[in-house]
Image: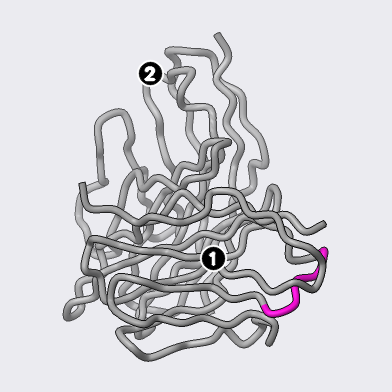
Amino acid sequence: AQKITQTQPGMFVQEKEAVTLDCTYDTSDPSYGLFWYKQPSSGEMIFLIYQGSYDQQNATEGRYSLNFQKARKSANLVISASQLGDSAMYFCAMRGQGSARQLTFGSGTQLTVLP
Amino acid sequence: DAMVIQNPRYQVTQFGKPVTLSCSQTLNHNVMYWYQQKSSQAPKLLFHYYDKDFNNEADTPDNFQSRRPNTSFCFLDIRSPGLGDAAMYLCATSSHIGTDSNQPQHFGDGTRLSIL
Protein backbone atom coordinates (compact mmCIF):
# COMPACT_ATOMS: atom_id res chain seq x y z
CA ALA A 1 0.00 0.00 0.00
CA GLN A 2 1.11 3.54 -0.70
CA LYS A 3 0.79 6.49 1.62
CA ILE A 4 1.48 10.19 1.20
CA THR A 5 1.76 12.49 4.21
CA GLN A 6 1.58 16.26 4.10
CA THR A 7 1.94 17.57 7.64
CA GLN A 8 1.28 21.26 6.94
CA PRO A 9 -2.45 21.95 6.60
CA GLY A 10 -1.72 25.64 6.01
CA MET A 11 1.27 27.78 5.19
CA PHE A 12 1.82 31.51 4.84
CA VAL A 13 4.61 33.17 2.86
CA GLN A 14 5.45 36.73 2.03
CA GLU A 15 5.33 37.70 -1.62
CA LYS A 16 8.71 37.26 -3.39
CA GLU A 17 10.03 34.90 -0.72
CA ALA A 18 10.64 31.17 -1.14
CA VAL A 19 8.53 28.52 0.57
CA THR A 20 8.91 24.77 1.07
CA LEU A 21 5.91 22.46 1.22
CA ASP A 22 6.63 19.12 2.87
CA CYS A 23 5.75 15.69 1.56
CA THR A 24 6.79 12.28 2.85
CA TYR A 25 5.77 8.97 1.34
CA ASP A 26 5.77 5.28 1.97
CA THR A 27 5.68 2.55 -0.62
CA SER A 28 6.95 -0.96 -1.24
CA ASP A 29 7.19 -0.45 -5.01
CA PRO A 30 10.79 -0.34 -6.24
CA SER A 31 9.82 2.11 -8.96
CA TYR A 32 7.46 5.01 -8.45
CA GLY A 33 6.78 8.58 -9.47
CA LEU A 34 6.02 11.61 -7.36
CA PHE A 35 3.88 14.49 -8.57
CA TRP A 36 2.85 17.87 -7.25
CA TYR A 37 -0.44 19.46 -8.25
CA LYS A 38 -1.82 22.93 -7.57
CA GLN A 39 -5.54 23.44 -7.02
CA PRO A 40 -6.77 27.05 -6.95
CA SER A 41 -10.11 27.88 -5.35
CA SER A 42 -11.76 27.50 -8.77
CA GLY A 43 -11.15 23.75 -8.50
CA GLU A 44 -9.00 22.67 -11.43
CA MET A 45 -5.97 20.47 -10.70
CA ILE A 46 -2.84 21.80 -12.35
CA PHE A 47 0.21 19.58 -12.77
CA LEU A 48 3.39 21.29 -11.55
CA ILE A 49 6.33 18.91 -11.40
CA TYR A 50 7.36 15.25 -11.51
CA GLN A 51 10.17 13.26 -9.89
CA GLY A 52 10.94 9.66 -10.76
CA SER A 53 12.33 7.35 -8.12
CA TYR A 54 15.40 6.59 -10.22
CA ASP A 55 16.06 10.17 -11.32
CA GLN A 56 19.54 11.22 -10.26
CA GLN A 57 18.80 14.93 -10.19
CA ASN A 58 16.09 16.90 -8.47
CA ALA A 59 13.37 18.04 -10.83
CA THR A 60 12.94 21.72 -11.65
CA GLU A 61 10.22 23.55 -13.59
CA GLY A 62 10.58 27.30 -13.64
CA ARG A 63 10.00 28.58 -10.10
CA TYR A 64 9.20 25.08 -8.86
CA SER A 65 11.81 22.61 -7.71
CA LEU A 66 11.53 19.31 -5.93
CA ASN A 67 13.87 18.48 -3.07
CA PHE A 68 13.94 14.69 -3.40
CA GLN A 69 15.60 12.73 -0.58
CA LYS A 70 15.02 9.09 -1.36
CA ALA A 71 16.56 7.67 1.81
CA ARG A 72 14.29 9.88 3.90
CA LYS A 73 11.32 9.21 1.60
CA SER A 74 10.63 12.88 1.20
CA ALA A 75 9.75 14.95 -1.86
CA ASN A 76 9.35 18.55 -0.77
CA LEU A 77 8.18 21.23 -3.19
CA VAL A 78 10.10 24.50 -3.20
CA ILE A 79 8.48 27.56 -4.73
CA SER A 80 10.88 30.42 -5.28
CA ALA A 81 9.89 34.08 -5.54
CA SER A 82 6.29 33.51 -4.42
CA GLN A 83 3.55 35.38 -6.24
CA LEU A 84 0.02 36.22 -5.13
CA GLY A 85 -1.26 33.82 -7.77
CA ASP A 86 0.51 30.96 -6.00
CA SER A 87 -2.14 31.03 -3.28
CA ALA A 88 -3.85 27.65 -3.64
CA MET A 89 -4.06 24.12 -2.27
CA TYR A 90 -1.04 21.99 -3.13
CA PHE A 91 -1.22 18.21 -3.32
CA CYS A 92 1.63 15.75 -3.34
CA ALA A 93 0.80 12.48 -5.10
CA MET A 94 2.48 9.18 -5.83
CA ARG A 95 2.06 6.80 -8.71
CA GLY A 96 3.08 3.21 -8.24
CA GLN A 97 3.19 0.22 -10.51
CA GLY A 98 -0.47 -0.70 -10.60
CA SER A 99 -1.93 -1.53 -14.02
CA ALA A 100 -3.45 1.91 -14.47
CA ARG A 101 -0.92 3.80 -12.39
CA GLN A 102 -3.43 5.24 -9.98
CA LEU A 103 -2.39 8.27 -7.99
CA THR A 104 -2.37 8.32 -4.21
CA PHE A 105 -2.82 11.88 -2.92
CA GLY A 106 -1.73 13.51 0.30
CA SER A 107 -4.16 15.63 2.30
CA GLY A 108 -2.85 18.86 0.84
CA THR A 109 -1.33 22.12 2.05
CA GLN A 110 -3.20 25.41 1.70
CA LEU A 111 -0.64 28.07 0.77
CA THR A 112 -1.44 31.73 1.23
CA VAL A 113 0.89 34.35 -0.24
CA LEU A 114 0.77 37.64 1.62
CA PRO A 115 1.32 40.98 -0.16
CA ASP B 1 -5.23 22.87 -27.29
CA ALA B 2 -5.77 19.26 -26.36
CA MET B 3 -7.60 19.06 -23.10
CA VAL B 4 -10.02 17.40 -20.70
CA ILE B 5 -13.46 18.99 -20.65
CA GLN B 6 -16.08 18.46 -17.99
CA ASN B 7 -19.70 19.48 -18.30
CA PRO B 8 -21.45 21.06 -16.63
CA ARG B 9 -19.20 23.11 -14.36
CA TYR B 10 -21.93 23.30 -11.74
CA GLN B 11 -24.76 20.82 -11.33
CA VAL B 12 -27.68 20.97 -8.95
CA THR B 13 -29.94 17.98 -8.46
CA GLN B 14 -32.60 16.87 -6.02
CA PHE B 15 -32.15 14.23 -3.39
CA GLY B 16 -32.69 10.86 -5.05
CA LYS B 17 -32.90 12.19 -8.62
CA PRO B 18 -30.41 10.51 -10.99
CA VAL B 19 -27.71 12.74 -12.40
CA THR B 20 -25.04 12.27 -15.06
CA LEU B 21 -21.75 14.11 -15.28
CA SER B 22 -19.76 14.07 -18.48
CA CYS B 23 -16.10 14.18 -19.40
CA SER B 24 -14.49 14.37 -22.81
CA GLN B 25 -10.86 14.45 -23.88
CA THR B 26 -8.95 15.34 -27.00
CA LEU B 27 -5.68 13.85 -25.75
CA ASN B 28 -6.45 10.34 -27.03
CA HIS B 29 -5.39 8.93 -23.68
CA ASN B 30 -6.25 5.32 -22.98
CA VAL B 31 -6.99 5.70 -19.27
CA MET B 32 -9.76 7.84 -17.77
CA TYR B 33 -10.42 8.35 -14.07
CA TRP B 34 -13.21 9.73 -11.93
CA TYR B 35 -12.43 11.28 -8.56
CA GLN B 36 -14.68 12.61 -5.83
CA GLN B 37 -13.33 15.51 -3.81
CA LYS B 38 -15.11 16.85 -0.76
CA SER B 39 -14.33 20.22 0.74
CA SER B 40 -10.76 20.57 2.06
CA GLN B 41 -9.98 16.92 1.29
CA ALA B 42 -7.81 15.10 -1.19
CA PRO B 43 -9.38 13.64 -4.33
CA LYS B 44 -10.65 10.12 -3.83
CA LEU B 45 -10.54 7.74 -6.77
CA LEU B 46 -13.94 6.21 -7.56
CA PHE B 47 -13.06 4.14 -10.63
CA HIS B 48 -11.10 4.17 -13.83
CA TYR B 49 -11.22 2.79 -17.35
CA TYR B 50 -8.10 1.26 -18.83
CA ASP B 51 -9.16 1.28 -22.48
CA LYS B 52 -12.54 -0.46 -22.25
CA ASP B 53 -11.80 -2.27 -19.01
CA PHE B 54 -13.70 -0.85 -16.05
CA ASN B 55 -12.02 -0.92 -12.63
CA ASN B 56 -14.02 -0.06 -9.55
CA GLU B 57 -12.37 0.93 -6.28
CA ALA B 58 -13.39 -1.41 -3.46
CA ASP B 59 -15.05 1.31 -1.38
CA THR B 60 -16.94 3.06 -4.19
CA PRO B 61 -20.66 2.92 -3.38
CA ASP B 62 -22.94 0.99 -5.74
CA ASN B 63 -24.81 4.25 -6.26
CA PHE B 64 -21.98 5.35 -8.56
CA GLN B 65 -21.71 3.94 -12.07
CA SER B 66 -19.67 4.86 -15.11
CA ARG B 67 -19.81 4.46 -18.88
CA ARG B 68 -17.17 4.92 -21.52
CA PRO B 69 -18.78 4.61 -24.95
CA ASN B 70 -15.57 5.50 -26.79
CA THR B 71 -12.02 6.70 -26.16
CA SER B 72 -13.03 10.35 -25.94
CA PHE B 73 -16.00 10.26 -23.58
CA CYS B 74 -16.64 9.03 -20.08
CA PHE B 75 -19.73 9.52 -17.92
CA LEU B 76 -20.36 9.35 -14.20
CA ASP B 77 -23.88 8.31 -13.24
CA ILE B 78 -25.17 8.77 -9.71
CA ARG B 79 -28.34 6.72 -9.50
CA SER B 80 -29.86 8.12 -6.30
CA PRO B 81 -27.84 11.03 -5.00
CA GLY B 82 -27.78 11.58 -1.27
CA LEU B 83 -26.75 14.68 0.63
CA GLY B 84 -23.36 13.08 1.26
CA ASP B 85 -22.66 12.95 -2.46
CA ALA B 86 -22.36 16.72 -2.72
CA ALA B 87 -18.79 17.27 -3.83
CA MET B 88 -16.48 18.26 -6.64
CA TYR B 89 -16.13 15.50 -9.24
CA LEU B 90 -12.90 15.47 -11.18
CA CYS B 91 -12.21 13.61 -14.39
CA ALA B 92 -8.63 12.86 -15.36
CA THR B 93 -6.82 11.09 -18.18
CA SER B 94 -3.41 9.61 -18.69
CA SER B 95 -1.50 7.72 -21.32
CA HIS B 96 0.14 4.45 -20.40
CA ILE B 97 2.71 3.11 -22.78
CA GLY B 98 5.09 0.43 -21.63
CA THR B 99 6.62 1.13 -18.24
CA ASP B 100 6.72 4.88 -18.64
CA SER B 101 5.41 6.28 -15.37
CA ASN B 102 6.36 9.91 -15.70
CA GLN B 103 3.27 11.03 -17.56
CA PRO B 104 1.03 13.11 -15.30
CA GLN B 105 -2.69 12.74 -15.10
CA HIS B 106 -4.45 15.60 -16.87
CA PHE B 107 -7.48 16.89 -15.03
CA GLY B 108 -10.59 18.65 -16.17
CA ASP B 109 -11.90 21.70 -14.34
CA GLY B 110 -14.34 19.57 -12.38
CA THR B 111 -18.08 19.55 -11.84
CA ARG B 112 -19.30 20.88 -8.52
CA LEU B 113 -22.41 18.89 -7.56
CA SER B 114 -24.99 20.23 -5.12
CA ILE B 115 -27.88 18.19 -3.73
CA LEU B 116 -31.12 19.89 -2.68
Task: Name the residue: 56% across, 54% down.
Answer: B111
* Residue A27 part of the magenta segment: no
SS at mark 1? strand
B5 or A100: nearer the viewer = B5
Q: Is residue B22 left or right of residue B86?
A: left
Report the front residue among A93 and A39. A39
Q: Residue A78, image x and y in percent?
A: 40, 34
On whether disc 1 and disc 2 are found on a single subunit, the reply is no
Q: Amino acid at mark 1?
A: Leu
The amino acid sitting under disc 2 is Ala
Residue A114 vertical position relative to residue A10 in the rendered view, above or below: above
* Tag 2 secondary structure: loop
Q: Which quadrant of the structure image shows residue B24?
A: bottom left
Q: Residue furthest bottom?
A: B53
**Front residue of this view, candidates A8 and B60:** B60
Name the colour scheme: one colour
Would you call the spot at circle 2 few (<14 residues within 10 Å), some (14-19), or many (20 or more)?
A: some
Residues packed near mark 1 inside 10 Å, few (<14), some (14 to 19) or many (20 plus)? many
Position of residue B26 measured from the top left corner of the image (x, y, whole percent):
24, 60
Q: Position of residue A87 (x, y in %)?
A: 53, 27
Residue name at image x 50 percent, y 62 percent: A25
User: Which SS type dominates the magenta stretch?
Assistant: loop
Residue closer to the observer: B32 or B96: B32
**For residue A108, which numbered disc appears in the image?**
none
Q: Bounds of the magenta span?
A: B79-83
Residue B1, above or below B75: above
Q: Chain of mark 1?
A: B
Which residue lies under the disc numbered 1?
A: B21
Indicate which label's residue lies in the foreground, 1 or 2.
1
In the picture of the structure, the residue carrying the numbered disc 2 is A81
